[in-house]
Image (cartoon, rainbow, N blue to C red):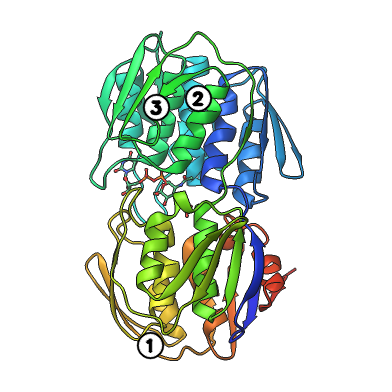
Amino acid sequence: MDSLLIKGGVPLRGEVRISGAKNAALPIMAAALLTGAACVIRRVPDLSDVRFMGQILMRLGAEVRFEGDTVRIQARQIKGTGDYELVRKMRGSICILGPLLGRLKKATVSLPGGCVIGARPVNLHLKGLEALGAKVTIKGGYVEVAAKRLTGAAMFLGGRAGPTVLGTANVMMAATLAQGVTVIESAACEPEVVDLASFLNAMGARITGAGSPTVTIAGVRELHGAEHEVIPDRIEAATYAITAAATGGEVTLCGARPDHMRAVIDKLNDAGVVVEANHSGLRVRRGGRLKAVDITTLPYAGFPTDVQAQMMALMALAPGISIITERIFESRFMHVSELARLGADIEIEGPSAIVKGGRLLSGAPVMASDLRASAALVIAGLAARGATQVNRVYHIDRGYENIDGKLRQLGARIERIEEA
Ligand code: EPU
């Protein structure tokens, strides 16, 4: 298993190009299952999760071709079964369920199971598909959905923690080919949902309201091929912004969309970080001393759970006490004990982490547990004195394109140690 060896203490400087958003690219690739015609998707990040979605689509019978950051998908004839072996490796693969049901009127997909960040149920996905007329059966670890025909319906998709991103995506995709009008209340408002809706509309769907809590989908008879460019990854951009602040450097995030990052920019400003929009994206630098700020993760447009771990690494460096509350995933604090190995003082109290910041961090070997936790460890390692080895780095390759290359370009002393 590869690891990253970091020698900390270098302020990062320069420009970094933000890649396409993983969490937009995955459902958009799945949406190509809704038509037999060719789809061309651009600005697709080169990530293991994306290549894996490509494999899933091929196993379903689609032709998938990667050419640089473009992927061409044509799903002329497909089967409706997503096996356990494929689905268990990536929880996001559940987003094939909606398009398979829409296109074939039936699908059998393995239930993805939980992961280290929480239970991750799919009850809301199934509630929405049932509302469209699908019969849902759970058997042998698989969910089977089938309908003679799908009929538009009004539904409420809010859950315990608010809306669901991939649940909204699944229902939206199935509803494009339903008869009549579907209205999703408490829909997820994330920019990735908006990006999926624009791709679906380019394929001939009739979706309005994406980005608001009420999304309306007027069903059509069929969809056609389309071309689309994926939005820049707001989570990757936030991660590099925090890295610049943590190392006391100055970094320009080329292509970043400030309109997708308001909550993160606002918290960074409160923490003493200067973020300026310019013609190429966002320029980020530390304004003076870092300040401790409290953070609560929320559905969009609130502070994203996918940036919680990275912000905790920054707060470990800010003198004072910061309370970080996780409201989306109940156990997304796996990074806490690893940050403690670098010298951070963090205690967990229920859904909150209390960070007593301002201590000097010093390098140590640490273990990555999930994608964003790994990013937090890289940030802490870059800010720490001495050497940090981040093990199990495959987690980070799931969601950050060429992270070591991009960081090196900004002056970081980081190398990948490949294990045979
Ligand atoms: N939930 C339910 N029932 C459901 C679905 C979700 O109770 O049927 C709950 C979840 O347990 C959680 C909350 O609703 O408490 C929100 O989960 P959501 O469904 O929105 O998460 P997701 O769609 O499975 C996507 C991203 C995650 C990101 C979350 C929240 C993709 C591929 N994944 O997951 O990304 O954290 O939205 O913004 O889009 C990551 O990139 O590191 C990552 C984990």
User: Which element carries disc 3, helix, strand or loop?
Assistant: helix
349 or 314, which is in the foreground? 314
Q: Label 2 sits on what residue type?
A: Pro
For image coordinates 40% across by 81% down, the residue present is: 290
Q: Is residue 374 visible?
A: no
Whichever of callouts 3 and 2 sits on the residue coming sooner in the sequence is 2
Whichever of callouts 3 and 1 sits on the residue coming sooner in the sequence is 3
Q: Is residue 361 left or right of residue 32?
A: left
| Quadrant in which residue 338 is drawn | bottom left
Kindly report which numbered mark, 3 or 1, lies closer to the viewer in this rendering: 1
Q: Residues within 10 Å of mark 3 (few under 14, many from 20)?
A: many
- In the rendered image, which residue does mark 2 sit on? 99
Kindly report which numbered mark, 1 or 2, lies closer to the viewer in this rendering: 1
Q: Which mark is residue 197?
A: none
Q: Is mark 3 within 8 Å of ligand 1?
A: no
- In the rendered image, which residue does mark 3 sit on? 171
Are the residues tagged 3 and 1 within 8 Å (C-beta)? no
Q: At which x and y percent is residue 226?
A: 64, 24
The number of discs equals 3
Q: Residues within 10 Å of mark 2 (few under 14, many from 20)?
A: many
Q: Is residue 196 visible?
A: yes
Q: CA distance from mark 3 to mark 2?
A: 9 Å
Q: CA distance from mark 1 to mark 2?
A: 49 Å
Q: Is residue 29 left or right of residue 355?
A: right
Q: Which mark is residue 358?
A: 1
